Amino acid sequence: MYDVIIIGGGPCGLAAGIEASKAGLSHLILEKGSLTESIRRYPKMMRFFSTAENIEIGGIPFPISGVKANRNEALQYYRKVAGYFNLNFKLFTEVNHVTRYAPTGNEGDQSEELFTVFTTDGQAYQARKVILATGYFDKPRWLQIPGEDLPHVTHYYDEPFQYSYTNVVIVGASNSAVEAALELYRADAHVTIIHRADDFRKTVKYWLVPDVKNRVKEGKIHTRFSTCVTRIEPGKVGITDLQTGEESELPADFVLILTGYIPDAGLLRECGVELNPETQVPVYDKETFETNVPGLYVCGTVMAGIYTEKVFIENGRDHAKAIMDHITGKPVRKVAELIERI
Ligand SMILES: Cc1cc2nc3c(=O)[nH]c(=O)nc-3n(C[C@H](O)[C@H](O)[C@H](O)COP(=O)(O)OP(=O)(O)OC[C@H]3O[C@@H](n4cnc5c(N)ncnc54)[C@H](O)[C@@H]3O)c2cc1C
């Protein structure tokens, strides 16, 4: 029996483990992949837009030689912090179901209710409270077009060298799409960005904008704005110009669909958490982060629904402070629930 089970070992899940330790609560972090699995799967050359101190957890300084950490530095940092706090985690253990029960059979008394957390390897773990910190990186936003599941199509960009001297179509015009396009162009790929709107997204990191726009001006990166991809076939994509309605095809040895990710509503529902049907935002208290299921909390990006641009490590790392205050019956510290970037 643990005081708290935390589902997800990303930065916010680890921060929750640290806060539980600090509060003297026993905890178990169940993580379906490696420690900080999402960050491990980020593009290999990615650099955080946040300064290092803004993604620190547990009050442990994150010293780097520059200002913003890269993926490898972040992986090293979170691993060492997890070790420093002696966090109790079980890796490669996926949770698929959580139930509540009254051990005394006293159905009416919610204060007595406990949780059983079930994993796909057939194990069950008991806890007084459960914190869901499962992030959003597992579920890409699919375009729902024919051919999207072909082997030359991916929703995750890793590194550029696989794509050198090939035709690559990138769908999307956000940070991920722009960063991939620049890296690919510099690795001698022939890149075309396709996006429904008429320009890059306003959230693109300000220092990337002149770089990508100048490459477009020079004809080194190609763009098709106000255009959507309607189908994918081996070696090509079908596109439609949204202004003229004209249909055409583009060569595509590879297609990178970088249109973002969304928290997996499935596990939330499995746990009994209600979701707004339009935004997929779970029902939770904005100050304590407790969901409609008493004793079950959301922490980090999992709470964002479609608004994933509003929850980052920067603010998500603090959610656990309020959660732990609520669990231990202390006055709840006020922490930033969401942030606006633009
Ligand atoms: C390319 C890129 C760059 C970014 N740069 C920044 C930045 O500069 N600054 C910033 O603040 N944010 C940045 N972000 C966003 C940031 O990474 C996320 O907000 C952050 O990872 C959220 O942390 P989390 O712990 O809530 O979720 P995650 O880090 O996604 O962790 C969730 C964990 O839960 C695990 N999990 C999922 N389902 C289950 C299950 N059923 N059972 C067990 N485990 C499960 C996953 O494997 C994962 O390890 C960036 C994101 C991307 C994609």
Image (cartoon, helix red, strand yellow):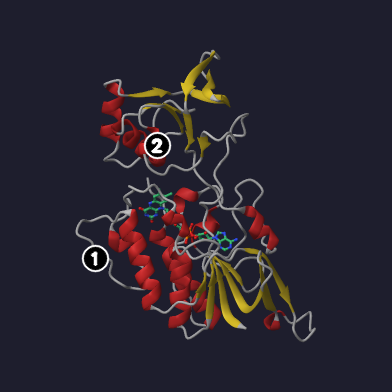
Mark 1 against mark 2, which lies toward the viewer? 2
User: With 183 as the anchor, is 153 left or right in this view?
Assistant: right
Q: Quadrant of the N terminus?
A: bottom right
Amino acid type at image mark 2: Gln
> What residue sits 54% from the left and 58% below the top?
303
> What residue sits 53% from the left and 79% below the top?
27
Q: Quadrant of residue 62?
A: bottom left
154 shown above or below 338: above
Secondary structure at badge 2 equals helix
User: With 75 as the anchor, is 5 left or right in this view?
Assistant: right
Query: What residue did someone put label 2 on?
Result: 162
> What residue sits 35% from the left and 34% below the top?
184
| Position in image of residue 244 (x %, y %) | 52, 13
Query: What residue did someone put label 1 on?
Result: 63
Q: Quadrant of residue 5?
A: bottom right
Label 1 CB less than 8 angstroms from ligand 1: no
Q: Quadrant of the C terminus?
A: top left
| Position in image of residue 324 (x %, y %) | 50, 77
Secondary structure at badge 1 equals loop
- Separation (CA) of disc 1 from disc 2: 32 Å
Tag 2 or tag 1, which sits nearer the N-term?
1
| Position in image of residue 140 (x %, y %) | 54, 44
User: With 240 as the anchor, is 57 left or right in this view?
Assistant: left
